[in-house]
Amino acid sequence: MFTGRTKNLGILGWPVEHSLSPAMQNAALQKAGLDYVYVALPVQPKHLGDAVAGLRHMGFAGWNVTIPHKSEILPLLDDVHEDARVIGAVNTVVRSGEKLIGYNTDVAGFLAGLEAAGCTAEGKHAVMLGAGGAARAVLWGLCKSKVSDIVVGVRNPQKAQALADDFREYGRISVFHWANDVFAEALSQAELLINTTPIGMYPKVDDMPPVELKRLPKSALVYDIIYTPEKTKLLQEAERLGHSVVNGEPMLVGQGAEAFRLWTGVQPDEALMRRILREGLV
Ligand code: NAP
């Protein structure tokens, strides 16, 4: 039962009605016996400043941040954790005393996916497809894991170069069109292939990133951060060729679990969170 003492959490975005986070977080909060409630906070971009001031004054314990507010919220916070600062996006806010601190738990989520696959990225040659918002968290996760180098394959190298430049000081990163011979050569040396594009995501489940999987060494892990469908065409093909694969589900659960830990200091039931998510996903 919620009382006057119940602490408030939520997800700030526009739109947010399709978010699975309220179901996932409330189930985990209830299971842990914590007196919190997690609600949807639909806020139009033009009202973000007022909304953050309101949440601050209403004493919210914290909240998740989703599209389109992840970068715009940065200057409205009192402090920003290194992961969020480097990535340039906040997906979790935590109240600490009077201060609002911004975090990015997508990095922990991405690393949870590697761990779930039993993969240690340190020293490995990594190839990443795509250079959008999620790619920034993946790139930072790879740099933090001390991979040997990262080759980014994209359809628009000029645009992606800006992303590589942002991370230049943290690792050896190069960008190529994925039809370039140098990219094909990198693929043949890769120990880790990560898809961060939405190619193959529901409903276009027959689509697949244009990479020659046959070039990839058999021992390479193929990681697709897409979580709908559970197994993209890329993962199906990779599995058929004998690769270990991991989908975006551990990343999705992992980012939520890390936010839960930051708000409450308690370890959530991640198996329960995964079950609730899977029930709500396509
Ligand atoms: P985004 O910011 O729109 O970036 C998408 C990237 O993919 C861009 O580099 C884009 O290239 C490229 N791309 C998109 N469609 C393409 C196509 N048809 N052909 C070639 N390149 C294409 O999206 P995002 O937020 O990074 O999300 C990407 C995917 O990650 C989505 O499927 C999302 O569901 C998933 N995701 C998963 C998690 C998780 O927790 N598992 C978290 C975040 C995101 P251009 O720049 O040239 O347009």
Image (cartoon, rainbow, N blue to C red):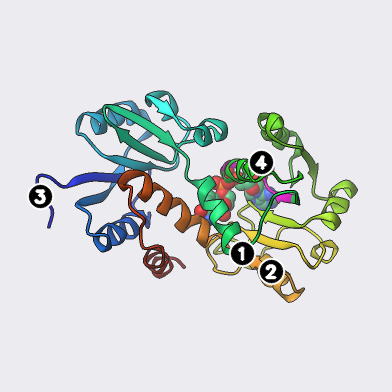
* Disc nearer the start of the sequence (4/3): 3
Mark 4 surroundings: few (<14), some (14-19) or many (≥20) residues within 10 A:
many
Q: Gap in Å between the C-alphas at discs 1 and 4?
A: 18 Å
Image quarter where the N terminus lies is bottom left
Q: Secondary structure under badge 3?
A: loop
* Disc nearer the start of the sequence (4/2): 4
- Residues under numbered marks 1 and 2 in contact, where contact means CB atoms less than 8 Å apart: yes
Q: Look at mark 4 in the image and give the residue it sits on.
A: 143
Q: Which mark is residue 151?
A: none
At x 61% / y 40%, what residue is drawn? Answer: 140
Q: Which residues are magenta?
A: 127-133
Amino acid type, label 1: Ala
Where residue 156 sits: x, y (%)? 74, 40
Indicate whether 82 appears above or below 2: above
Q: Is mark 1 within 8 Å of ligand 1?
A: no
Q: Which mark is residue 244?
A: 2
Mark 2 surroundings: few (<14), some (14-19) or many (≥20) residues within 10 A:
some
Where residue 261 sits: x, y (%)? 37, 49
Indicate whether 114 appears above or below 162: below
* Disc nearer the start of the sequence (1/3): 3
Q: Gap in Å between the C-alphas at discs 4 and 2?
A: 22 Å
Mark 1 surroundings: few (<14), some (14-19) or many (≥20) residues within 10 A:
some
In magenta segment, residue 129 = yes
Corner quadrant of residue 19: bottom left
Q: Gap in Å between the C-alphas at discs 4 and 3?
A: 44 Å
Q: Secondary structure under badge 4?
A: helix
- Residues under numbered marks 4 and 3 in contact, where contact means CB atoms less than 8 Å apart: no
* Disc nearer the start of the sequence (1/4): 1
Q: Is mark 4 within 8 Å of ligand 1?
A: no
* Disc nearer the start of the sequence (2/3): 3
Amino acid type, label 3: Thr
